[in-house]
């Protein structure tokens, strides 16, 4: 599988920023929906979670995990592999905090169970597509020509 170009890597960060949630695979057969916060400058994704969750436990142990996103409107599909770690960066948590995050915690930002987790990607298999209209065009073209549809840029991002 080919490595994506720098422009395609930049598109990965731009497009994953438009995705609101994905599925975090922490261990065994457990996969949970999570909302992420994109931080291309640190080459990281952030999660706000509660103490004792699968996400928090995996971060405490520095586990390798996978995060899968599939979003037609953001025109990205990706399986991202990396490691989770617990962060005590209170300024980062304050910057990311929102009413959506607050809804999960009885005492909001002051809840003793609030935890910030950093996901540091190592590798991602990525599909950058042209979205719904482009996909329909490719299907129509394939029907007329007998050629396989072009599903967009597909390759690997190594971080």
Image (cartoon, rainbow, N blue to C red):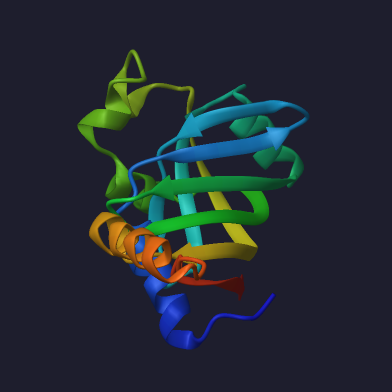
Left or right of 72: which side holds 119? right
- Residue located farthest toward the bottom when viewing the structure as drawn: 6
Q: Quadrant of the C terminus?
A: bottom right
Q: Quadrant of the N terminus?
A: bottom right
What residue is at 48 percent from the left and 23 percent from the top? 113
- Residue located farthest toward the top when viewing the structure as drawn: 106
Nearer the observer, 31 or 3: 3
The answer to whether 104 is drawn above or below residue 91 in the figure is above
Query: Residue 49, how many percent across, how many down?
Result: 48, 31
Left or right of 8: which side holds 95? left
The answer to whether 90 is drawn above or below residue 144 in the figure is above
| Among the 4 quarters of the image, the one containing residue 21 | top left
What residue is at 46 percent from the left and 65 percent from the top? 151
What residue is at 59 percent from the left and 72 percent from the top? 155
Query: Residue 71, how many percent across, how many down?
Result: 37, 48
Query: Residue 14, how many percent across, how many down?
Result: 33, 68
The answer to whether 94 is drawn above or below residue 31 in the figure is below
Nearer the observer, 25 or 132: 132
For residue 57, say whether it is visible.
yes
What residue is at 40 percent from the left and 60 percent from the top? 143
| Among the 4 quarters of the image, the one containing residue 3 | bottom right
């Amino acid at each position: 599988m080919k490595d994506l170009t720098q422009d395609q890597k930049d598109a990965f960060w731009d497009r994953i920023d438009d995705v609101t949630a994905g599925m975090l695979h922490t261990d065994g057969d457990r996969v949970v929906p999570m909302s992420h916060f994109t931080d291309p400058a640190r080459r990281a994704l952030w999660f706000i979670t509660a103490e004792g969750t699968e996400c928090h436990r995996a971060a405490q142990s520095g586990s390798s995990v996978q995060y899968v996103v599939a979003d037609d409107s953001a025109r990205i599909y990706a399986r991202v592999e990396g490691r989770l770690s617990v962060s005590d960066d209170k300024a980062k948590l304050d910057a990311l905090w929102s009413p959506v995050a607050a809804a999960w915690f009885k005492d909001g930002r002051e809840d003793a169970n609030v935890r910030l987790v950093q996901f540091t990607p190592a590798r991602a298999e990525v599909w950058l597509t042209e979205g719904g209209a482009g996909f329909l065009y490719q299907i129509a073209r394939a029907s007329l020509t007998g050629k396989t549809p072009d599903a967009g840029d597909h390759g690997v991002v190594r971080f």
